[in-house]
Image (spheres, coloured by chain):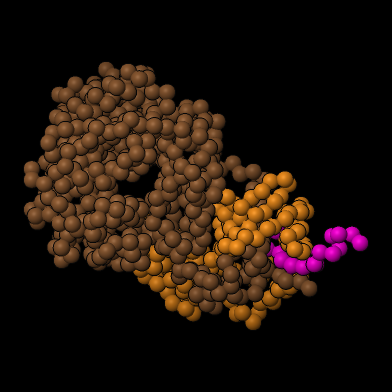
Chain colours: A orange, B brown
Amino acid sequence: MDAARELRAVETLVKLKRAGREFEVEILARQGREVRARVDGRELSATVDRLADGSAILSLEGRRFRIVGARRKDAILVAVGPRTFDFLPAQSAARRARPGLAAPEITAPMPGKVLKVLVKDGDRVTAGQALVVIEAMKMETTLAAESDAIVKRVCVAPGDTIDHGAVLIELSPAVDSSLIQSAPEVR
Amino acid sequence: MARRKLKVLLIANRGEIALRIIRTARAMGIKTVAVYSEADAHSMHVAAADDARLIGPAEAAHSYLNIAAIIAAARESGADAIHPGYGFLSERPDFARAVDDAGIIFVGPPAAVMAQLGDKLAARRLATESGVPVVPGIETAEVAAAREFAAREGYPVLVKAAAGGGGRGMRVVEAAAGLAAALEAAAREAYAAFGDGRIFVEKYLARPRHVEVQFLGDQHGNIVTMGERDCSIQRRHQKLVEESPAPGLDGAIREAMLAAATRLAQAAAYTSAGTAEFLLEGGRFYFLEVNARLQVEHPITEIRFGCDLVAEQIKIAMGEHVDTPAAPRGCALECRINAEDAAAGFRPAIGTVLELRIPSGPGVRFDTHLARGAEVSAFYDGLLGKLITYGADREQARRRMSGALDELAILGVTNTAAFVRDVIASEAFARADLSTRFIEEHFPDWPREGRAETDAALIAAALTAAGALGASPGYTVGRNTAAQAGDRSPWTRLGSFELWRRS
């Protein structure tokens, strides 16, 4: 039998973005230490040897990388040797499909502190309305809604310390949700 | 001065330096008292000390810069001495005076010495009187006088605050047209940052090296020097990589610099550890300033001279004589690991340390206060640690540094580890092409990530998303992890990351 056929057919498709670039990674199969993945359309074979501390040695194209991974609320963090990569979820088809919403969430443009939260869960807001005031780099910055929306959830409170890219407020479209046909979750 | 045995030392600082001072005091049989802000209650330095006192809220102005609270903590804990570390109150003469007035030993130079050296103009005058060369310059806020000076010495010129340091209020002016605006802006910034609007205009050296001399002075008038450090690799006037000795430094120039530092320290009646900083260009050196405190990069001197500079400071504070240093050996390198995004103009970063791998091995030392779960906040300086390596020669120290940096991983706080690894591994660093322009000359477009490395990162990210990599389930740290974030986390909601499981 073809060795590849013995690999367990699975598993994961992840759409990620980093520094404005989007990536698509699919783990096609995994068996033991063998991993087959499709990275932006290129099929790659790697071996992954897990270490006791949760990190691993990833061998790819004749090179060995020590990798460490962790999940955070808003990101997947990976270290390849000393270099770290912060991947955020790429906007999903379902999210993009929401009509009339410029951005589904208000995120911190830089690390800092939340000074004021001007809205609460369920509030109806209009384009340009101030939502949250942060202090970063010794400056106050007011973050406003880019389009009419409903505040789905306020994720921070005054005084919270926030990292670059942290989600501060989640928004829903300002239209009647029963009119939106949701995109399929599974393909 | 009478000898006093020191029994209890309070460390008026935080982070790696507080921990480092505690370790030395412990080895000397001295009890230690840590002070901490509300943000640092769970920090390593608090756990390491024999006693710990809360001194205020997270804001440094109300805690680590709060002189009254620190002196009160010293009194309550029975401390007979205070070590200020670096940064915070370490170069504030009013603090040294307040400690002295409270009948507590200040581990550092006397307030009057600090005041003289802390004023750039007074320090410059002292250097000139001691026969130490200085960069040509004048104190003026007058545009006409500045223009005349610049026309005589040639552009570019540097406009900077007379008080303070750390690159704040500094401006390079390339031509006469920009001078007036630079003077005005520098005066405004200097006043805002230091409460002192005096301005200094000096000749700007195009491609200098930063070389500094470590010295120790005791209370009996003895001064000894302990070699030099090259700290040319800087960003925004802040050091990133330091080494000792300064590679390729002419022996006669080295001797002249050590002698100049000795004359300066003697003229200032200096006690404790101090550093004379110089710029070196075209075979000439110019006095920059004296840092009247322990420097961040002091370990590279310790490693070459086989000594403990904090122990020396404590012994000097107790009235002991300084010893003639042993002959230095080999080479030492230090890389600062800062919470900064080197790919985004060294923008400060914060976060929770989710994963941590610390290097070790022959000739490797890592001074850090980090631990898994540690919070790095926007309240304090973002120095996460200092990686120091020793080698019989520069190349061995460099290779050990490169290997140690490959072992280092800090996940959760964006940091400079990968940047300094690329610096150390570069051909330009290997041949010691050092100047304060190193980063803009050799690393203008960092990072240059290889495709294999990015592919490895993406596969690792997918494996992490699938739960096949990382800490075992149920193990969480900090506030921002998925499990503790509960249903607010997109990870617990199917589809948020477009994570599909088939079969």
* Front in this rendered view, residue B334 or B429: B334
Q: Position of residue A94 (x, y in %)?
A: 66, 70
* Front in this rendered view, residue B33 or A3: B33
Residue B71 among magenta residues: no
Residue B130's place in the image compared with B189, above or below, is above
Residue sticking out furthest to the right: A1
Q: Residue at x 8, y 45 (%)?
A: B2
Question: In the rendered picture of this protein, how many numbered marks are placed on residues?
Answer: 0
Q: Give the range drawn in magenta.
A: A1-25
Q: Which residue is drawn at 57% across and 50% down?
A: A81
Residue B308's place in the image compared with B500, above or below, is above
* Front in this rendered view, residue B112 or B171: B112
Q: Position of residue B362 (x, y in %)?
A: 49, 44
Q: Which residue is drawn at 66% across and 48% down?
A: A64
Q: Position of residue A165 (x, y in %)?
A: 50, 60
Which quadrant of the rendered structure holds the C terminus of chain B? bottom right
Residue sticking out furthest to the bottom: A178
Query: Residue A6 vs residue A23: left or right?
Result: right
Q: Residue at x 36, y 61 (%)?
A: B44
Q: Based on the displayed image, in which of its 4 quarters is residue A2 positioned?
A: bottom right
Q: Based on the displayed image, in which of its 4 quarters is residue A9 positioned?
A: bottom right
* Front in this rendered view, residue B347 or B32: B32
> From where the camera sits, is residue B313 visible?
yes
Magenta portion: prevailing SS class: strand
> From where the camera sits, is residue B117 visible?
no
Q: Based on the displayed image, in which of its 4 quarters is residue A141 positioned?
A: bottom left
Query: Residue B282 vs residue A177: left or right?
Result: left
Which quadrant of the rendered structure holds the N terminus of chain B? top left
Residue B105's place in the image compared with B426, above or below, is below
Residue A16 among magenta residues: yes
